[in-house]
Amino acid sequence: MSDTLRSPTDSRPAGRVNEIDLLRFVASMLVLLFHYAFRGMAADNMAAMNYPLLAPVFKYGYLGVQLFFLISGFVILMSAAGGSVRGFIVSRLIRLYPAFWAACTVTYLVCILWGGPAYAASFKQYLINMTMISDYLHTPAIDGVYWSLSLEIRFYVLITILLLIRQIHRAEFFLIAWLVATMALEWHPIGKLRFLLISDYATFFIGGATIYLVWSKGMTVRRALMILFSLILGLTQSIKGLDEIRHYYHVDMDPVLTALLVTSFYAILLLVALRKTGALANMKWVTAGALTYPLYLLHQNIGYIIFNHAYPGLNIHLVFWGTIALMLAGAWLIHNLIEKKAAPLLKRILNTGLDTFSQLRPTRR
């Protein structure tokens, strides 16, 4: 007997989900405003100024990363749904690397020219960072925001394994097993398994991927329960993590507000999946979505360096909003001058290399 709660067609047509572009941009701005309005001056002496007008609100902006991971779960499972290992890998490489190479290079140059001792970076460190796996090569990141990329890569690896064993059509059962394992590891930690299964943030990838299944195949009792348990685990981890935030930044944090924000992320994405966003679904947010990734990569250390040079000599409002405008302009330039031009070229290079490799492989008799 089917456990379907409503009766959509079994497979809805794939297409661009306009609201996802807007949600990506919102997530990136949450993180940016967390860094600029609060985090830079709150710990580690990273910046000479914060923005007291917005700090009480955007001290919660770090939760934008959780929203990013929810969106990633949705988008990456959508990208992999066609079942092509090659297509998935190529699409991820051309999506990630051109903007990353550009942003990493710009950040490195700004650090060595104006960063001073606080933002020193060696050429060797820069080269290793350009691989995007510096975290796994025990090399400090040139910009602290790169930490989330290592988690994204682990998620891509898990999805790639499903594609390699030709089980992507059974992704729902993998997500259930992953969620159960993550919940078990929350109460009985096993270090290596927690690392492999990204246990600190897995629930958000799982929740987003399950919501994609709702978008593509409809809501079922099983999917509703998966989303509910994913949310419960996400709330548990987010509220538990407030103790570390309080201790590290010496600031009061409201668990109720934290829970409301995390719940709203799930609720909004679920409304998108259920086609309940009204006119918003027909509005184009392509430019906002395109700016998100380069903006995320570019903003933190460069912004702090600008703060350190410009403040208190210049008006705080001018420095704050001017830096945001500069970062948006930089993200626009990276997207239009680098991503748009490099992505087709990199795609051709990768496909040519893969074609050559496949031809060199011995054929089975």
Image (cartoon, helix red, strand yellow):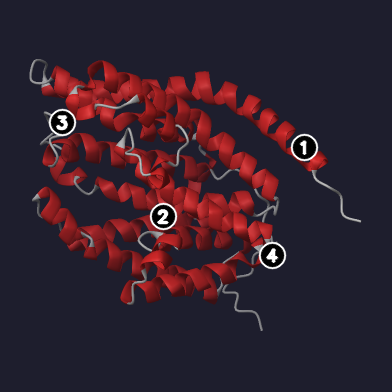
Assign the C terminus to one quadrant of the image.
bottom right
Alpha carbon distance from label 1 to label 4: 35 Å
For marks 2 and 4, the one nearer the N-term is 4
Estimate the spatial distance between the alpha carbons at disc 2 and disc 4, rounded to whole Å: 23 Å
Q: Nearer the viewer, residue 359 or 207?
A: 359
Which label's residue is closer to the chain start, 1 or 3? 3
Q: Amino acid at mark 3?
A: Ala
The residue depicted at 69 percent of the width and 45 percent of the height is 86
Label whose residue precedes the other's in the sequence (3 or 4): 4
Per the image, label 4 sits on a secondary structure element best described as: loop
Q: Nearer the viewer, residue 206 or 156?
A: 156
Residue that badge 4 annotates: 10
Label 2 or label 3, whichever comes before in sequence order:
3
Q: Nearer the viewer, mark 3 or mark 4?
A: 3
What separation in Å lies between label 1 and label 2 (alpha carbons)? 42 Å
Reading the image, the residue beneath label 1 is: 355
Q: Amino acid at mark 2?
A: Ile
Q: Do we see residue 228 in this rendering?
A: no
Q: Residue at x 24, y 20 (%)?
A: 322
165 to 323, vertically: above or below: below
Residues under labels 2 and 3: Cα distance? 33 Å
The disc at residue 268 is 2
**Percent coordinates x, y for residue 244 in the rendering:** 18, 57
- Distance of mark 1 from mark 3, alpha carbons? 49 Å
Q: Which mark is residue 47?
A: 3
Of callouts 1 and 2, the N-terminal one:
2
Distance, label 3 to label 4, CA atoms, is 52 Å
Q: Mark 4: give few (<14), some (14-19) or many (20+) Cα within 10 Å.
A: few
The residue at the point 21 percent across, 24 percent down is: 305
The crowding category of the residue bearing disc 3, from other C-alpha atoms within 10 Å (few below 14, some 14 to 19, many at least 20), is many
User: Do callouts 1 and 4 mark residues in contact (Cβ within 8 Å)?
Assistant: no
Pinpoint residue 353: horizontal percent, then vertical percent: 71, 34
